[in-house]
Amino acid sequence: MTTTCSAPGKIYLFGEHAVVYGKRAIASAINLRTTATVSESDQTTISSILGTTGIDYMVHPYISRCIESLAVPAVSIRIDSEIPVGSGLGSSAAAVIATLGALNAEFRLMMDSATLAEVGHRIERDVQGAASPTDTAVSTMGGTMLIQPGVASSRLRLIECDIVIGDTEEFSSTKELVGNVRILHEDYPGVMDSIFDIIDNLSEIGVPLIKGRDYRSVGELMNIDHGLLDAIGVGSAKLSRLVCAARDAGAYGAKITGAGGGGCIVALVRGSSADGGGADAVASAINDAGGRAIITKASEDGVVVRETF
Ligand code: MEV
């Protein structure tokens, strides 16, 4: 039997970094997905854009950890992804959840989706050193979600407006950025806790605004969050350039998404329209500012399995 399983990447509307300190975050699955194709084999192989290996913690740390933590027999796994790697769009979580979902179905392990998300979170934490449950929860469940560490995540109304991502195409290490923020937090706990409390408040205020589809106000709060992310040292000149370009082109709001340092920005925009300011205009402005724009939408689809005999 061969099992194919796909899982989505995600954007953060609010709460990256603060969520590592137990604060609330709002994130949404998007229409960019990673697919894992699994079949039983004589020996274990993992193939991806990075090459073909066996269990290999240098080249394929996440997939190697998935195979070993489920203790499954020899298996061949192929990973194909539409999500840029190391860009803050949850590429590693999508690969982990797609792989776990495929192994779960192939070997009839009977894990439900909550267990899948939990095992995926543990794997991300083991490989990265620190990880909130956001990426693995959103990749498993899909949709727009309110994440509260230590409390069950809840599903919100799906973001319905267009989303434009701006990729700086500069690699960023989540582990390194989380480490830098930790040092700032150790040096200035009062200041950093106050900033995290404000970000937590943005998520709280964001919930009814998303329910009411008030994307103009959601965008304003995203702009505030971007300023706070800059304040905790995870901005860069290029991220700011792309954020300003998106806002000037008429986005409701734009901010860093994910760990920052490089990686991506996310802009909420109204649908393309004759009076400008739509997804196409924002995408061109991002491209002109030196980024790579991706127009996408939020997605209700989490992990999806297909078996072929
Ligand atoms: C990385 O995409 C987001 C961070 O908040 C880390 C995490 O939540 O695991 C920086």
Image: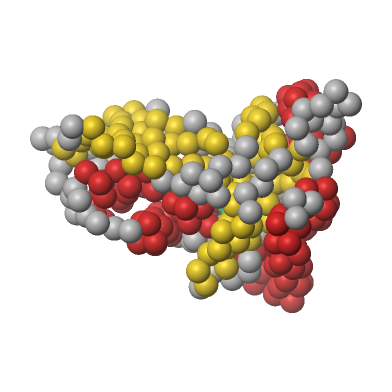
* Residue placed furthest toward the left: 42
- Which image quarter has ligand 1? bottom right
Percent x, y of residue 112: 33, 58
Q: How many marks?
A: 0
Occupied quadrant, residue 58 = top left
The residue that appears at 44% across and 32% down in the rendered structure is 81
Percent x, y of residue 148: 57, 68
* Residue placed furthest toward the bottom: 190
Q: Is residue 195 visible?
A: no
The residue that appears at 36% across and 34% down in the rendered structure is 79
- Foreground of the two, 210 or 72: 210
Q: Using the image, determine if residue 47 lies above or below residue 190.
A: above
Q: Using the image, determine if residue 80 lies above or below residue 103.
A: above
The residue that appears at 43% across and 36% down in the rendered structure is 34
Q: Using the image, determine if residue 94 lies above or below residue 224.
A: above
Image quadrant where one finds the C terminus: top left
Image quadrant where one finds the N terminus: top left
The residue that appears at 62% across and 49% down in the rendered structure is 158
State how the image is colored: secondary structure
Percent x, y of residue 181: 64, 61
